[in-house]
Image (spheres, helix red, strand yellow):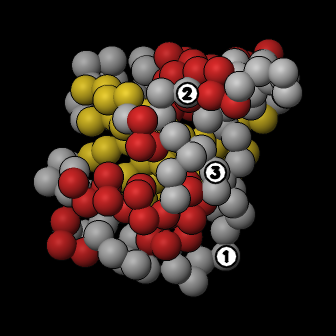
């Protein structure tokens, strides 16, 4: 794998009467994920594998991003990605290391943990809602701690793109 895109879902409703898995994007989350899609249209994403948590908010985030991520990409809704820890996410990535690019759409704290794992010693913020970090690896044998390089790290907030790195 050369490129790993890590996307945290957009902002979800704060409905504590609902099961966490079924929480939907709120209005801000809908707008921010569509703004992120517009930004990502500037990049030419090749057909690749997308691994998405099956929670409602991550699926809705994917639906708002699928045009920019290349609609012909292969999407897998992976139950193991819902609230996964660093080790589980790392295992998912290693299984796909022969792919030239993969995209993960999921949740914290696992996504921030894997970001910090690959980008050791970089002073970057945690992965907030509606953010994407793209990590580059020089070859698939170097997908390990501290071996990634950050290509870009952005967040969509209030219909604006904020560069975090």
Residue at position x 32%, y 52% in the image: 92
Identify which residue is drawn at 51% across, 22% down.
59
Say if 120 sits above or below 125 in the image.
below
Compute the Cα span from label 2 to label 3.
13 Å
Residue on which disc 2 sits: 55
Secondary element type, mark 2? loop
Using the image, determine if residue 74 lies above or below residue 27: below
Q: In which quarter of the image is residue 69?
A: top left
Q: Do the residues labelled 2 and 1 touch (CB within 8 Å)?
A: no
Answer with the quarter of the image where residue 12 lies: top right
* Crowding near the residue tagged with mark 2, few <14, some 14–19, many ≥20 C-alpha atoms within 10 Å: many
Residue 78: image location, x then y, percent: 38, 35
Q: Residue 123 carries which label?
A: 1
Going from N to C along the chain, the mark reached first, 2 or 1, is 2
- Give whichever of 55, 115 is nearer the camera: 55
Residue 16 in the image: state x and y as whole percent.
85, 27
């Amino acid at each position: 794998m050369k490129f790993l895109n890590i996307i945290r879902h957009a902002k979800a409703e704060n409905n504590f009467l609902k099961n966490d898995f079924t929480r939907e994007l709120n209005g801000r989350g809908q707008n921010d994920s569509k703004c992120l899609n517009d930004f990502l249209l500037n990049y030419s994403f090749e057909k690749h594998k997308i691994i998405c948590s099956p929670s409602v908010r991550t699926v809705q985030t994917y639906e708002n991003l699928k045009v920019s991520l290349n609609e012909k990409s292969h999407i897998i809704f992976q139950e193991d990605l819902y609230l996964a820890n660093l080790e589980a996410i790392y295992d998912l990535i290693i299984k796909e290391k022969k792919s030239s690019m993969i995209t993960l759409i999921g949740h914290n704290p696992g996504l921030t943990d894997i970001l910090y794992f690959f980008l050791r010693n970089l002073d970057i913020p945690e992965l907030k809602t509606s953010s994407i970090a793209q990590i580059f690896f020089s070859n698939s044998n170097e997908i390990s701690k501290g071996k990634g390089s950050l290509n870009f790290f952005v967040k969509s907030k209030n219909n604006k793109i904020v560069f975090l790195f």
